[in-house]
Amino acid sequence: DVQLVESGGGLVQPGRSLRLSCTASGFTFGDYAINWVRQAPGKGLELVGFIRSKAYSGATEYVASVKGRFTISRDDSKSIAYLQMNSLVTEDTAVYYCARGDTYCGGDCYLDYWGQGTLVTVSS
Amino acid sequence: SYELIQAPSVSVSPGQTASITCSGDKLGNKYTSWYQQRPGQSPVLVIFQDTKRPSGIPERFSGSNSGNTATLTISGTQAMDEADYSCQAWDGRKVVFGGGTKLTVV
């Protein structure tokens, strides 16, 4: 069975850093793009960014509000994707999900499997 | 940036048909997907590429997309369908989501 498990969330002070992990199983991890999606309390889904498969150079894209602060990477040998979050602000407080896209994740991209999410709380 | 607009809430009686819409500029020229999210749970894909159902999704879920509007239709709505539903499309560089619609079955 396809499974995605996020970890690394917690309480962090503004300005500090946190790294989230997304550990995958049940499929050939390297063949798929991985998206990070967040959901602030009581709000809708927001894409944070994604990383394409190595077949497409592992290219990344980010939403404007996190560009320059967040970095997505992947280790296909371990079937893990990472979300490095620096210079955190209170507005980054949310549940963070990783979700699988297809290998390229372009115009027909959809997210067919999601993890259970990990809560990040940015507060002093 | 590309925006997808959804009504905040929709109500439906059990057994009736629920229609949840998603609006965006020339959305009919893009593929739309839909996600169901029950309280405290992760999103689940219910429709992809406008009209396709993943395996395990009941046939009562269907989708359409034309002009500026995509529609998720739930026929014979059941109490277990009460959830938030979010649409998703591609803005040219990344996926974007609508704000979500809370479906209440009353």
Image (spheres, grey):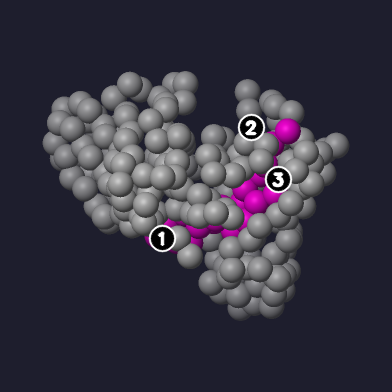
- Asked if badges 1 and 2 are on one and the same chain, I answer no
Given the image, on which type of amino acid does mark 1 rest?
A: Glu
Q: Given contact means CB atoms under 8 Å apart, are the residues at marks 2 and 3 in contact?
A: no
Chain assignment, label 3: A
Chain assignment, label 2: A
Where disc 1 sits, the SS reads loop
At label 3, counting other C-alpha atoms closer than 10 Å, the crowd grade (few under 14, some 14-19, many 20 or more) is: many
Where disc 3 sits, the SS reads loop
Chain assignment, label 1: B
Image coordinates for residue B10, horizontal then vertical, percent: 21, 48
**Residue under the point 32% across and 29% down:** B61
Residue indicated by mark 2: A3
Which of the pair B19/B11 is nearer the observer?
B19
Give the residues in magenta: A31-51
Mark 2 and mark 3: span between their CA atoms? 18 Å
Q: Nearer the viewer, mark 2 or mark 3?
A: 3
- Asked if badges 1 and 3 are on one and the same chain, I answer no
Mark 1 and mark 2: span between their CA atoms? 30 Å
Q: Tell which circle, 2 or 3, labels the residue nearer the N-terminal end.
A: 2
Q: Residue A52 shows which numbered tag?
A: 3
Given the image, on which type of amino acid does mark 3 rest?
A: Arg
Image coordinates for residue B14, horizontal then vertical, percent: 16, 31
* Residue B67 appears left or right of A119: left
Q: Is residue B64 visible?
A: yes
Q: Residue B3 shows which numbered tag?
A: 1
